[in-house]
Image: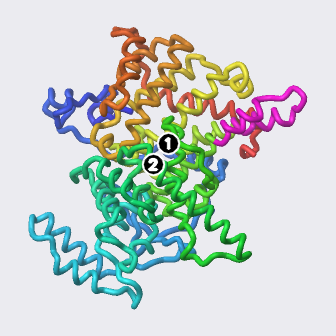
């Protein structure tokens, strides 16, 4: 959604920035500094958000406080360590190793040598007499783990780490694609990794975890995605069978770390939502929420996985609805259960943002938007648009059950979400390839909505979509053929006003459907 500089916000005008310009057109014309000041939400809005969070059961003391400090972009990173999967123990990040990495980064920034002496010194250092850590350890902890924590720290020990392997390549690429290092150069496409994985006879769990780090950021072939996910699934099944045979718990060295499983489940969820063909897998989708709540409260990773959990529950609810039907004339209990389940899911999709810290909010009161907040908004819009598209395609059954029909308010809301998806900055798009598929899925939803309602704004919003990677050429041609070339009469309603007004009114309706108290 559009942001406004201080002057445009004061004048209540749209802030238009030319692609190559450093100032908006109004500030350029008046020769004013184009500045974005940080604003805090009003006291009333903050209090309302706290009340909603308490009602959802997401606030308070459910999560453990963690010692965090803000990173460059405001993201929280561990202060003196990271959480490992082994009982969520605190693993100290050694100060000497941090200093060595800092020296290496300073030398590289100054255009100096690669610092092989410092690297050797780092590799000789043993933490508490334990295993040695490789040079990528600290880079992963500080640049990747707060965003995508899908590699277990024990996989980075020197006695199991291959510097020339797939995991090392994935870690280097993930560090370059980190959202708080937007100035860093991109690390190329995924074709080389696709070839390397295809040559592997047996793909290890560590290599699969490395690829999971990059799945949201790079475009892998369907064969690579399926092989990585099946590797995690097969390992999980093997462990379960061994437990049944031994009638005892298998040593942890044979287990799948929770972080790796979370990476597989979240990747599987997003691929389903964007419509990429994936084989049905037996993965424990219900583990996402528990693992996410163990992460730092202000980290991107925590809220990314919480949103993936909502998406996974939406996918599961769709499957249950297709199998059991929407309503049963002979079973009023089943009908009411389905009604409450969908109402609660929609309620959480609309209001889950109340748990986000300010640096992850892509809203008017939080300026300027950070790259991670833009990614979060894209993912949230995908879930909401998928939910409403599914319900509106079943207006006579499911839509009638929860009082949702394609009336102008709903259509304006969906158009506002789609518009915000299509104006994602190219710099963010280049680092999160998943957004390319999100944009294409949004275009499919809007085209379907146009066929269903002939709401004029749908065509104007579709005109904003471009197939930037030329990955959906046939569909792009179909869209252009069906919507024409315009121009169209568009009702320009501020996206924020539509979002807040619709969200609040619809939330009240859902509370009545469920019968509150506390949304049960």
Q: Which mark is residue 271?
A: 1
* Label 2 vs label 1, nearer the camera: 2
Considering the whole magenta stretch, tell me its main secondary structure: helix
Q: Quadrant of residue 128?
A: bottom left
Q: Quadrant of residue 235?
A: bottom right
Packing grade of label 1 (10 A; few <14, some 14-19, many >=20) is some
> Would residue 10 be visible to someone looking at this image?
no
When the figure is inspected, residue 428 is found, relative to residue 258, above or below; the finding is: above
Image coordinates for residue 55, horizontal then vertical, percent? 67, 48
**What residue range appears in magenta?**
316-342
Residue under the image location 67 percent in, 20 percent down: 395
Q: Quick check: is 262 in the magenta stretch? A: no
Relative depth, front residue between 446 and 274: 274
Residue 13 in picture, x, y percent from top left: 31, 26
Q: Kindly indicate whether the residue at mark 1 contacts the one at mark 2 (C-beta within 8 angstroms).
A: yes
Q: Relative to 515, is 294 on the left or the right?
A: left
Q: Position of residue 261 (x, y in %)?
A: 54, 59
Residue positioned 38% across, 56% down in the render: 197
Q: Label 1: state its secondary structure.
A: helix
Query: Which residue of the protein is positioned furthest toward the bottom in this rendering?
Result: 129
> What sort of colour scheme is used for the picture?
rainbow
Residue pictured at 44% horizontal, 25% vertical? 443
Residue 306, placed above or below residue 246: above
Q: Which mark is residue 225?
A: 2
Examine the structure image and report whether residue 341 is included in the region drawn in magenta.
Answer: yes
Q: CA distance from mark 2 to mark 1?
A: 9 Å
Left or right: residue 221 versus residue 115 is right
Seen in the image, is 128 located left or right of residue 387?
left
Residue 282 spot, x, y in % from top left: 63, 52
């Amino acid at each position: 959604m559009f942001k406004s500089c201080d002057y445009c916000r004061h004048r209540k005008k749209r802030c238009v920035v030319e692609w190559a310009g450093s100032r908006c057109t109004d500030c350029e014309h008046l020769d004013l500094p184009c500045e974005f000041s940080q604003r805090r939400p009003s006291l009333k809005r903050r209090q309302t958000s706290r009340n909603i969070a308490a009602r959802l059961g997401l606030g308070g003391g459910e999560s453990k406080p963690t010692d965090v400090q803000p990173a460059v972009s405001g993201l929280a990173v561990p202060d003196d360590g990271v959480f490992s999967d082994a009982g969520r123990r605190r693993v100290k990040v050694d100060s000497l190793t941090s200093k060595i990495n800092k020296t290496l980064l300073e030398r590289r920034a100054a255009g100096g040598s690669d610092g092989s002496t410092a690297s050797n010194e780092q590799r000789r250092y043993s933490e508490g007499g334990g295993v040695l850590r490789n040079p990528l350890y600290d880079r992963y902890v500080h640049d990747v783990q707060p965003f995508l924590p899908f590699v277990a720290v024990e996989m980075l020990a020197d006695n199991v780490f291959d510097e020339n392997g797939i995991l090392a390549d994935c870690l280097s690429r993930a560090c370059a694609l980190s959202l708080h290092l937007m100035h860093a150069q991109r690390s190329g496409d995924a074709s080389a990794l696709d070839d390397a994985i295809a040559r592997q006879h047996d793909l290890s769990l560590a290599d699969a975890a490395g690829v999971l780090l990059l799945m949201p950021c790079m475009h892998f072939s369907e064969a690579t995605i399926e092989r990585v996910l099946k590797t995690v699934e097969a390992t999980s099944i093997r462990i379960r069978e061994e437990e049944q045979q031994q009638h005892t718990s298998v040593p942890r060295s044979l287990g799948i770390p929770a972080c790796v499983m979370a990476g597989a489940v979240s990747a599987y969820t997003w691929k389903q939502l964007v419509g990429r063909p994936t084989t049905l897998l037996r993965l424990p989708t219900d583990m996402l929420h528990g693992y996410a709540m163990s992460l730092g409260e202000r980290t991107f990773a925590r809220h990314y996985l919480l949103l993936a959990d909502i998406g996974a529950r939406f996918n599961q609810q769709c499957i249950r609805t297709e199998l059991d039907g929407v309503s049963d004339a002979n079973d009023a209990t089943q009908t009411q259960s389905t009604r409450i389940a969908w109402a609660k899911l929609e309620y959480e999709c609309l209001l889950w943002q109340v748990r986000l810290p300010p640096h992850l909010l892509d809203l008017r009161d939080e300026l300027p938007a950070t790259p991670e907040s833009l990614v979060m908004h894209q993912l949230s819009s995908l879930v909401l648009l998928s939910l409403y598209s599914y319900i509106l395609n079943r207006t006579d059954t499911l839509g009638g059950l929860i009082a949702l029909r394609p009336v102008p308010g709903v259509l304006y809301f969906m158009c506002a979400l789609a518009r915000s998806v299509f104006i994602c900055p190219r710099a963010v798009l280049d680092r999160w390839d998943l957004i390319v598929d999100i944009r294409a899925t949004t275009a499919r939803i809007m085209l379907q909505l146009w066929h269903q309602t002939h709401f004029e704004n749908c065509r104007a919003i579709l005109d904003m979509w471009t197939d930037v990677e030329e990955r959906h050429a046939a569909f792009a041609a179909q869209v252009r053929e069906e919507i024409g070339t315009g121009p169209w009469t568009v009702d320009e309603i501020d996206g924020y006003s539509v979002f807040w007004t619709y969200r609040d009114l619809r939330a009240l309706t859902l509370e009545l459907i469920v019968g509150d108290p506390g949304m049960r």
